[in-house]
Image (spheres, grey):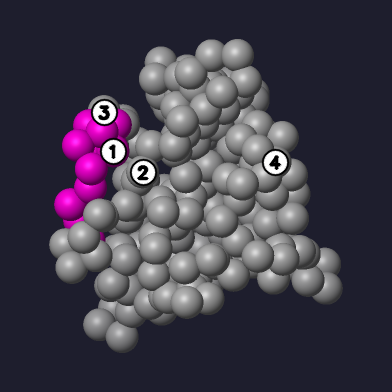
Amino acid sequence: MVLKLDSRLKAQFEHDAWQRDEVSDTDIHYSRLSGMAPCDVDVLCDFTREEALLLVIRCPKRPARYFQGKAEPKPLHIKDKSDPSTGIVTTATGAQYVSDYDLMCVWRFLGGRDYEKVFFSAPDQRLPKILTPEAQSLLDKVQWRLQAEFQHGAQDDYLSPKNPGVQMKTELGHLIDRFMVFNIGNPEYVCNGAELKQVYDSLLGKSAWPYDEGGRHHAART
């Protein structure tokens, strides 16, 4: 099946989400901003509330919201860029994937103003799919509930020169990197890396931000 974005799909999408998935107006609102499926916004609000977590993702392209759950999320080994008008990447073999949710970090709320990092990357980069037991346990609890499953560990914890970093500012009016913050059930949309740094500084302290002023990860500078 070739995935196409047309006026009929756009018109039916939110009506179907309300009817089928029983999502809220808030879920629809953040879906419009982020490119996430409305029901996945709802799931991550519930999940972070249940587990007392702060979870941050880099958003997919906005039109991807129409195809989450209809196409597989773009896996880590596919390096082709998705079409900004659809959020779909079509490979040389004709396979189609939808722009995925990039997990950035996971922190556990301890009470008061305190959070503790949950290391959410492979301790051994030679075995990239083997996470820590705590991270794997959390992933197992949420993956089956999502229309678009996470495809890899957290970028903040990817201690490699290949870490892609973040775009710190909006360029020429184009929103390059956008983020969703789910803080113990409360969603927040963030427009760029500079605004995300302010969220980290406020909630986690200045030492939690792992990127320099240009958005390069500290591990990529070694």
- Judging by the rendered image, the residue that carries numbered circle 3 is 141
Q: Which is closer to the viewer, label 3 or label 4?
A: 4
Q: Is residue 87 above or below residue 21?
A: below
The residue tagged 2 is 119
Mark 4 vs mark 1: give the one in front: 4
* Residue sitting at x 20%, y 56%: 129
In terms of secondary structure, where does tag 2 sit? Answer: loop
Q: Nearer the viewer, mark 3 or mark 2?
A: 2
- C-alpha gap between disc 3 and disc 2: 16 Å
Q: Which residue is mark 1?
A: 135
Reading the chain from its start, which is encountered first: label 1 or label 2? 2
How many angstroms separate mark 3 from mark 4 (CA)? 28 Å
> On the image, numbered disc 4 is attached to which residue?
201
**Horizontal placement of 199 versus 15: left or right?**
right
Q: CA distance from mark 4 to mark 1?
A: 23 Å
Question: Quick one: label 4 or label 2, which is nearer the N terminus?
Answer: 2
Report, in whole angstroms, how far the alpha carbon at label 1 lies from the one at label 2.
7 Å
Q: Residues within 10 Å of mark 3 (few under 14, many from 20)?
A: few
How far is the residue under mark 4 from the one under mark 2? 19 Å
* Residue at 58% in and 45% down: 208
x and y percent of residue 144 in the render? 25, 34
Amino acid type of disc 3?
Answer: Lys
Q: Are marks 1 and 2 in contact (CB under 8 Å)?
A: yes
- Secondary structure of the residue carrying tag 3 is helix
